[in-house]
Image (cartoon, grey):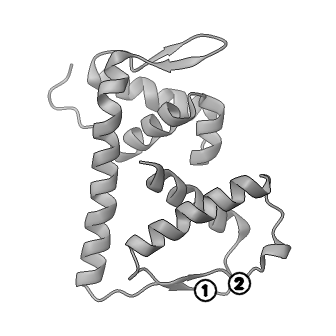
Amino acid sequence: MDTDARVELRQLRAFVAVAEELNFGRAAQRLYVTQPALSRTIRALEKLVGCDLFHRNTRSVNLTSAGTALLEHARDVLDGLDAGLTAARAAGGENVTVEPALAPTEVDLPIGAPEVAELFGHFARLLHRAHTARVVRDDVTVDEVMALFAGAFAASRG
């Protein structure tokens, strides 16, 4: 293992997504990246760590013992970063609110009602924790809203 090598936040986000989904395709969709790019990111992280983090075969993906050991710490790092950024924004006087211009009936979501309810619940809890966040825009795209929800959902599951 290269002692000068640094783990990137995107690698940790990718690792957590694959660990939670136990599926590279779904994790790639969740992160809005291609599956080959996600696989390369995970391989690079495994090279930095010095061992496999996942058992892979054509039918399944499972965490190795090393992957299990890393998962909670990776979540802690990402949650800590989010908390730190929220605190810094609050201290800096930044006040942001999310107010999408699209009404729910104008958005065709590729997931069912139970998933939407769960997603909005996680998003609401995240916003409650970071109540100083405020973004007001009238040109929010569906992709931006879905990316925001996906990030909030991932962060709240940690």
Q: Nearer the viewer, residue 57 or 124?
A: 124
Q: Nearer the viewer, residue 72 or 87?
A: 72
**Residue under the point 29% across and 89% down:** 93
Residue topped by disc 1: 137
Q: Secondary structure at mark 1?
A: loop
For the question of whether residue 148 can be seen, the reply is no
Above or below for 132 versus 44? below
x, y percent for residue 103: 78, 80
Query: Of label 1 and label 2, which has the lower sequence position?
Result: 2
Above or below for 133 versus 11? below
Q: Are marks 1 and 2 in contact (CB under 8 Å)?
A: yes
Query: Counting other residues with Cα less than 10 Å from the Cα at mark 1, is it few (<14), some (14-19), or many (20 or more)?
Result: few
Residue 52: assigned label: none
Amino acid at the residue labelled 2: Ala
Residue with the most extreme left position: 3
x, y percent for residue 92: 25, 85
**Residue under the point 25% across and 65% down:** 84
In the picture, measured across the screen, residue 40 lies left or right of residue 112, that is left
**Residue under the point 66% across and 13% down:** 59
x, y percent for residue 139: 68, 82
Residue 101: assigned label: 2
Q: Secondary structure at mark 2?
A: loop
